[in-house]
Amino acid sequence: MRPTAKFSISFGLVTIPVAAYNATDSSTSVSFVRIHTADGGRVRNQPVCSLEGIEITPDEIGRGYKPDGGDTVVPLSDDDLDALPLPTAKTLTILAFVAGGDIDPLQMGKGYYLGIDSPAAAKPYVLLREAMERHQRVGLGKIALHGRETLAMIRPVEGALVMQVLLWPHQIRSLDGVLPERQAEVAPAEVAAAETLMDSFGELSEDDVHDHYREALEEIVAAKLTHREPEFPAAEEQPAGQVMDLMAALQDSVRAARKSRGEDEGEGAGGPSGGGARSGRTTKKSTTKKAPAQKTPAEKTAAKKTAATKTAATKTAAKKAPAKKAAPAKKSASGGGRRAG
């Protein structure tokens, strides 16, 4: 893997020469080319000079800067950019250490792996990495990368340092026109049901992080090349339409999530909103099982005879019992009779 840039990390008076490597690979993502629909020919973007109307080769293309409020373009050479009096041109100066949760994910840009650029950088590299791990902080700084200065975050990841390019705060658009004018209100029971649904989700599987779209697209392309119909595995039909009963939808979602993991429908502590419909259904089943069945007249007569037999047996056993054990019971009973009288 070839480095895309080389610079130094300035950590106080400690300098760490590093090389930056692309941490992501966009070439594996699905991409399309533009074609002429009439004949399938490729439609290309040709660099053309707006003044002469002729195609320009890559070595004839330079950089220019257009100041705000005007149409004038000022040419800039590599020497002009190298002469910029910026300390960030060759050095990432760490300005502060903050908690990772303080960084707005909207600011996150491209990521780079940072490796040491000389043997002498090994010890300070490990020192910075372990200090951030123990302190549970990430470093914030500025670096001029690929012709422009940008914010950057450095954090430890699996024994290495990773740099994440950050957008400037003014590059994050406001929420004007995004939020609804009238805020909807939700009941505490609905929030509790949503939390139960969140708890019912399992961990990500390999299938969850698989690019099924790319696979399906490749099958369509293969089918077109061999003049056949594409073959796709049968997929479960997803429910369509607008959900009107939010609470019922949450409860059904919990049951579906548990069913997909092979869990019993009644498994787990409680349910949405402290049990909800599921708890009521379980109680109804239990009540049906425990309800006494209606007896026939013959069964009632047999039950009475059995009860009479048990009573007679109890009296006989009481008569045969030793007098010493029965005496305290008689004394207690007689004493109770006097007090009652």
Image: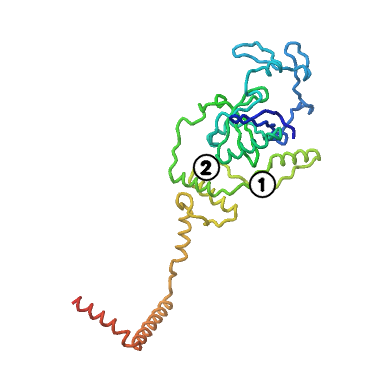
Estimate the x, y position of residue 13 in percent, counting from the top left: 60, 29
The quadrant where residue 31 appears: top right
Residue 170 lies, with reference to residue 292, above or below; the image says: above
**Residue at the disc numbered 1:** 207
For residue 49, side relative to residue 328 (left or right): right
Estimate the x, y position of residue 211 in percent, counting from the top left: 68, 41
The three-letter code of the residue at mark 2 reads Val
- Residue at mark 2 to residue at mark 1: CA–CA distance: 28 Å
Residue pictured at 69% horizontal, 28% vertical: 6
- In front: 134, or 220? 134
Q: How many marks?
A: 2
Q: Nearer the viewer, mark 2 or mark 1?
A: 1
| Callout 1 secondary element | loop
Q: Mark 2: few, some, or many residues within 10 Å (few <14, many ≥20)?
A: few
| Callout 2 secondary element | loop
**Residue at the disc numbered 2:** 243
Estimate the x, y position of residue 41 in percent, counting from the top left: 79, 27
The quadrant where residue 339 appears: bottom left
The three-letter code of the residue at mark 1 reads Asp
Residue 128 lies, with reference to residue 203, above or below; the image says: above
Residue 252 lies, with reference to residue 26, above or below; the image says: below
Residue furthest to the right: 226
Residue 264 lies, with reference to residue 155, above or below; the image says: below
For residue 155, side relative to residue 116 (left or right): left
Q: Quadrant of the N terminus?
A: top right
